[in-house]
Image (cartoon, coloured by chain):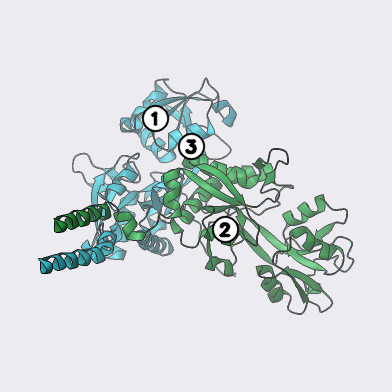
Amino acid sequence: MKMRSLITAITTLFIILISLPARAADGKDSVFDRIMRSGTIRCGYYVFPPVTYRDPSTDALSGLSVDIMNLIGERADLKIEWTEEVSFGNWVTALQADRFDMVCTPMWPEIPMARVAAFSEPMFYAGLSPMVRANDERFTTDDLERFNQPDITFLAQDGNALASLTKAAFPNAKLRVMPAMMDGPTMMQEVITGKADVILLDKNGMISYNQNSPVKLKLIAPDKPIKVQPFTLAVRRDEMILRDFISNAIQALNNDGSIERLLQKWEPEPYTFLRAPKPYEVPQP
Amino acid sequence: MKITMTSFITAFFIILVSFPALAANEKESAFDRVMRTGQLRCGYGTGAPLIVVDPNTKEISGIAYDLVEEMGKALNIEIVWAEEVSWGSLSAALRSGRVDAICSTVWASPSRGKSMAFTRPVFYSTVEAFARIDDKRFDNSLDRMNQPDVRIAVAEGDVTEEIANLDFPKATQAVHPQLAGDEYIFMSLIENKADILFLNTAHMIDFMKKRPGTIRKIPLPRPLRVWKNTFAVEIHEQELKDMLDTTVDQLLNTGMVDRLIKKYEPEFPGVFLPVARPYEYGAQK
């Protein structure tokens, strides 16, 4: 009798195990598979114009990234859920903790970051150039070599790729490194108050700061950027299928002019951002 | 009895321990199957100039056929043209395992990207809008096309329906089943059952050979879509995709794709947009 009960219990357990082959195979759904099952992409995001704006009374989000992601959702029949606001200091932890599926606002695909995240094809680009106080008389020409002098102090953040970029491009200048968690406006105050002379930034950063500040900043030699920065979307390092899916969608939106239309809609000034080049050649007549 | 019970439990645990491995290997991947058999089983949609099937001899030809046969030579695997698949059932054919890849090339749309992984493109092609030869109402006016009195002929479940839904939601759709074929949709335009249809220029050229002077391309500021023509595999087949990607790269970089485009271009002018080179030559004198 005991033997029969044991056999029955073992047989039941075996049947249960057989019914769970997928779980046994890899133990866990991929983020991509979960998105396909739920029909929803859960987004992490930051708020920064013109990528994202938040209505102070309703908390509703709008902006370039919101429109791009909604368009991807529309084309792929997926719902876009804006799940959690992140900072540049905590997004990796939140992504790895599975609190959302991907970062839906542009991220810079820096080499060290690629150890922990995978980045999509770029949606668009921006050039990074030295940004100084508009009234700083030392910088009135496009002479970038003027910045590579010991009397010039650059500003960067700890752990940020701009620090290594600055060191490589201007090895003779001083570099003041601020804590990783310091926010953008506080960083800018360092330049405004003369504690630092210059910071590498893009045109959108300059416009955004100048809109809210009586003391203006200016970019030097914006047509000769120190680096051209791709603006991509980030997923977890092991989510290559999701990365490919998002890349394909971005390419489709670039190829049919959708991203161009949205850039024109949201850019604070025409051509604030650089466009992705056409991936095809148009034969000349 | 004791011995029997011990043996039974031991046997059970041996099975249990080996279970995850069995579950993991339960289904052979398409890549493993291709490597084991030395054959790539191709599914294909039909339509000139990609894939044409001779109705009498069943012989297959076309630029996609030539490209994939060249890929087979490069990979030293046999290409088996296993199954003709309707354009709306590509994903199902891959998922069922009846075919390893879609070899007729596929437009990599975001909605298809939910269930298919795409290789690098071999070329690009456009979707344009067409009207009856004497109908000039829509020239350079996307807005005029998006009106309730405009009837757009679409094929159920394919990208033409997607374009109509997304870009021209106010227009009326004349929906045709996929199996009706392009000829049927063309005829709906000529017989005034629809006002507009969306197609690759290649289809128009093919049709105009049979019925010259009946329809015309609507002049617009830009094509409605520019699509990557890629090969497709089941969404989880990353290894197979990577292998085909490498082969596509070789065909692009050795000029094979250019040679094949040149072969088909005279009969299908302007249909193929070549992939932009990912490199630049040094300054040449």
The N terminus of chain B: image quadrant: bottom left
Is any part of residue B272 visible from this angle? no
At label 2, the amino acid type is Ala
Residue A89, percent across and down?
A: 65, 62
Secondary structure under the numbered disc 1 in the rendered image: loop
Residue A94's tag is 2
Judge depth for marks 3 and 1 and give the one in front.
3
The C terminus of chain B: image quadrant: bottom right
Q: Residues within 10 Å of mark 2 (few under 14, many from 20)?
A: some
Q: Are marks 2 and 1 in contact (CB under 8 Å)?
A: no
- The residue under label 1 is B212
Residue found at x 30% / y 32%: B179
Secondary structure under the numbered disc 2 in the rendered image: helix
Nearer-N-terminus badge (3/1): 3
At label 3, the amino acid type is Glu
- The residue under label 3 is B128
Q: Residues within 10 Å of mark 3 (few under 14, many from 20)?
A: many
**Which shade is chain B?**
cyan
**Which shade is chain A?**
green
Residue B15, percent across and down?
A: 21, 64
